[in-house]
Image (cartoon, rainbow, N blue to C red):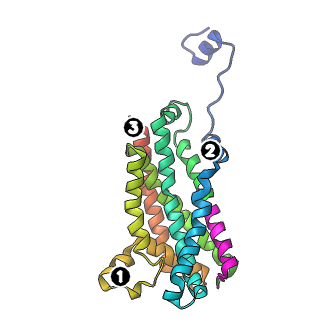
Amino acid sequence: MDKHDPKSFEEGITKITRPKKPSAISASITFAWRALLRIRYVPEQLFDVTIFPVIFLLMFTYLFGGAISGSTGDYLDFVLPGILVMTVSMITMYTGLDLNKDIEKGVFDRFRSLPIWRPAVLVGALAVDAVRYLIASTIMITLGYILGFRPEAGFIGVVLGVLLLLFFAFSLSWIWTMLGIVVRTEKALMAMSMMILFPLTFLSSVFVDPTTMPNWLQKFVEINPITFVVDAVRSLIHGTVAINDILMVMYISIGLLLVFGPLTMYFFRNKN
């Protein structure tokens, strides 16, 4: 046995061969499966993607439809893409909350000690969250069709709008993932997320046309990232494609990934 040769030394002290290090894809799939199992054993986690979208759509359509558009049918065609963006954007914060819980329980430290591709912990969780966004979108659009929603661009326009929204939501969730590592408690993270998301979603073009707002408010709404996403998704669904809005959403999403992806991995590696 040559003690300077790691392989020979390992074979000399044990007959059991150490398993190979899992690939990045294999490790990511494993953590995605873990996230799916958590949903299986705690199905109440799906309330935010099943019950809330239904409540939001019914409440806003029948509460404001007659007053704003004169009929709930016309308002439904206008507001459904907006509520779709609002709902999925608000769901993104649960990525950070789940990660914060793992840190608090000590599971996070166990994962970091494993000989795996470290980003797999985050990539797996984010991949399953993309499935949650898709479930919420499917439920809301299906309910919209039942209530009378008729997209002028047809099914293809709806699919393109949802794909653009999923890309934006995936990029946005990296902010909450980073905060989930940095912020010390779940309540603090929840408060911080609400403080950011509520003004962005309500002071946008989700519910009404911004031209009806005061000038000073219009200026904020026009530069609000959520407004760009709502306008782009709305234009794809109703066949009035606004290239500038779609490109702006792509730029914002890529920018979020470039900024918060590396920051998240930095805090992930250096978390005490």
Where is residue 165? Give x, y as percent. Answer: 55, 68
The front one of 169 and 186 is: 186
- Residue depth check, mark 3 versus mark 1: number of the one nearer the observer: 1
The circle on residue 38 is: 2
Q: Element under label 2?
A: helix
Residue range in magenta is 133-152
What's the amino acid at mark 1? Gln
Disc 1 vs disc 2: which is toward the camera? 2
Whole-percent x, y for residue 145 in the image = 68, 78
Q: Is residue 138 magenta?
A: yes
Q: Where is residue 43 in the image (x, y as percent from the top left)?
A: 64, 50
Q: Are marks 3 and 1 in contact (CB under 8 Å)?
A: no
- Dot 3 amino acid type: Asn
* Crowding near the residue tagged with mark 1, few <14, some 14–19, many ≥20 C-alpha atoms within 10 Å: some
Q: Relative to 11, is 75 above or below?
A: below
Q: Name the residue under label 3.
A: 270
Towards the viewer: 4 or 139? 139
Which residue is denoted by mark 1 in the rendering? 218
Residue in view at x 48 percent, y 35 percent: 105
Question: Could you tell me how far apart the alpha carbons at marks 1 and 2 are, in whole angstroms?
Answer: 43 Å
User: Which quarter of the rendered picture does the N terminus lie within?
Assistant: top right
**Horizontal placement of 183 versus 55: left or right?**
left
Q: In this view, does 111 lie to the left or right of 266?
A: right
Q: Earlier in the sequence, mark 3 or mark 1?
A: 1
Q: Taking 237 as reference, is 260 above or below it?
A: above
Who's the residue at 45% across and 78% down the image?
205
Seen from this angle, which residue lies furthest left? 216
The disc placed on residue 83 is none
Give the secondary structure at mark 3: loop
